[in-house]
Amino acid sequence: MSGELPPAKGDSDLRGATPDELRPPPDTLVEVRGLKKYFPIRTGFLGRVTGQVRAVDGVTFWVRRGETLGLVGESGSGKTTTGRTLLRLEEPTGGSARFAGQDIFALGGEELRKLRRRAQIVFQDPYGSLNPRMTVGEALREVLHVHDLARGAAASARVHELLETVGLRREAEARYPHEFSGGQRQRIGIARALSVEPDFIVCDEPVSALDVSVQAQVLNLLADLQERLGLAYLFIAHDLSVVEHISDRIAVMYLGRIVELGDARAVVASPRHPYTKALLSAVPALDRAARRGRIVLGGEIPSPAAPPSGCPFHPRCPHPLKDADCARIAPPLAEKAPGHFAACIKEPAYVPESPP
Amino acid sequence: MRLLEVRDLRTYFRTEAGVARAVDGVSFGVEAGEALGIVGESGSGKSVTSLSIMRLIPEPPGEILAGSSIWLKGEELVGAPETRLREIRGNDVAMIFQEPMTSLNPVFTVGDQIAEAVRLHRKASWKEARARAIELLGLVGIPDPARRVDAYPHELSGGQRQRVMIAIALSCEPDLLIADEPTTALDVTIQAQILELLGALRRRLGMAIVLITHDLGVVAEVCDRVVVMYAGEVMEEGPVEQVFREPRHPYTQGLMASIPRLGQETERLAVIPGIVPSPTAWPTGCRFHTRCPYGWELCVREHPPLFPIGGDRGARCWLETHPERRAAVDRATGGFLGLAGVGAAALGAEGPIALEATPAESWHRRAAGEPGVPAPEATAPDAPARPLAEDPDVERDVER
């Protein structure tokens, strides 16, 4: 897994470097800096804007070629909006996103269409994203036509190849979405994403609606495809065990911000942010002996329309050193161990012994 | 006498595709104060089982077959008149569901709805019932209950709505609470709160719980005993710790091996190949044989009974009467599943990885040969064709 240090570092101070101050590694495919997406709250007859839901509030991360970055969080964390804004399914409020060096947010019509040949998305509910009146073959051929990739016999051959790639028989092409089970429909969703030969796929809760045995089939398929095709994934999910399993690195989101970011094993084995600790301890464990001390958080997730001041987690935070500063200071996502970042001012920072 | 005794329960549905044998000969019991988990994937029959206990199956198209028995505190519920059932539901048994919002009436305050439930089951004035509602809201951990009692369902979060449903369920002090996927729609930190609440209420009120879920972890958190269902039958049952430490049925083994576990690095997940068969056409012999890596011709031919395997456990698998095959399977799986509960440290550095590789492989070899289009009977003829979305969906946006 990617245990390497970020290659370059800006001025590091005593609070530890933040991803914003770091230069991403050279094989970075997707680079997101300070991404913001606010949704206006409109009220009244005139629909006046009376507030903002800060769904994503200054998020910085990168995804390297062939890497899986897991984005985990509860409802309202902004993980789905992050993925959608990144692909321009939502227009951003602020920040920047680059794909292979190209500014995604500056792309116009034709360029955007080209981007979508290289950056795709797989949704949670494949049924909702498949046209029920089109056979699987028609749906796949349509994508090939739209992107001018193949026609006629070449398209048919490509459809067969895609179906085989995702573990379906050729005969599947003549069938309609309702004739398939949930897991098979997700395979079709993946086949469609693959049809344009992308480098990058946003997987938005791709296994959440599936039974556990089928979930394993789809997770293995995603891992195989990554290995064979060198795909990079942004894997968005609420299930930490699934995210840990598939990811090289994990970003934990809470109320529109990344509160922890680091190597997947490190985040799970030694979480630095009190929210991550609580989240990990809340996952029901199969073996009672191995169960960690349960931290049951009080209260509910606050509304992203009115996030708490300072650290957005402070009202629910069980950290023993929590004090008035937590309600006052917005904590930076600072390096707490090499390549491991957390947004908590009460956790000691990592400071390299000799500056580079 | 057990609190609940289900014997040979068969609940069938008439469908266009034939008779769906959703629950097909299920037996289990629940002691007073005990928590039983019923675990299974979709189509296993776990929810139909719970609805059958409450006699909430619409008849027709559903039917609880003659010969089925559901004894609650010694009283037979199969064939009991609706008037009696209504007394039992609420007084003796209460139920909570996955989606609390759909079970709450949006135009009444939660206090009114709890008070109504209180008054349905005991003589109480509205004033007394309201006081009881406030007390119950406090009991289920709603902050500031005297004020929240006047809230409407939409003013509450998902976790709080589920607490209100639990308060309504508790209003009659039931001996048995049936919880059907009570935390599936909730965030994991909120799920932890609700599971904690269920455990606390059970200890405090001595109430038995039947918890229906697809999540083995939730069962491990809450339950004493577990029933693993597949294709309308009980495949394995026993005390939770024993079953999860040493699963005996290949289905339970496969299920456990296919779940990624926190902090345990696994390169490939084990996979149960194929899909759950259709309830209108269960496979012959053992219903799991079409997906089982260890099956042989006996499994195709003969339907196995639920063999008792000692220590209050049972497994519906022919391996139980074929010790030489059982031993071979145990060798093949390296006893890995039995060691799952032991920490990685105790096994040494190489232990878990080396041991894990074997079962995952044996499951996977089978999986690799088995992609596939569903057989015609596996399709869902009753699934309503969805209207074509007129607005272009988001995904087509990507491709435009």
Image (spheres, rainbow, N blue to C red):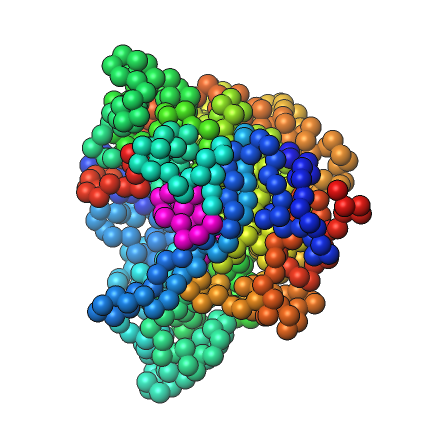
Residue positioned 51% across, 68% down in the render: A308
**Residue A281 showing in the rendered view:** no
| Horizontal and vertical percent position of residue B394 | 31, 42
Residue positioned 49% across, 32% down in the render: A100
| Segment colored magenta | A71-95
| Horizontal and vertical percent position of residue A155 | 29, 17
Q: Quadrant of residue B96?
A: bottom left
**Residue B205 showing in the rendered view:** yes
The residue lying toward the viewer, choosing from B102 and B72, is B102
Residue positioned 39% across, 63% down in the render: A52
| Horizontal and vertical percent position of residue A236 | 48, 43
Q: Is residue A258 left or right of residue B159?
A: right
A352 is higher (above) or lower (below) than B203: above
Q: Quadrant of residue A117?
A: top left
In the picture, the quarter occupied by the C terminus of chain A is: top right
Which residue reaches farthest right?
A: A353
Query: Does residue A84 show up magenta in the picture?
Result: yes
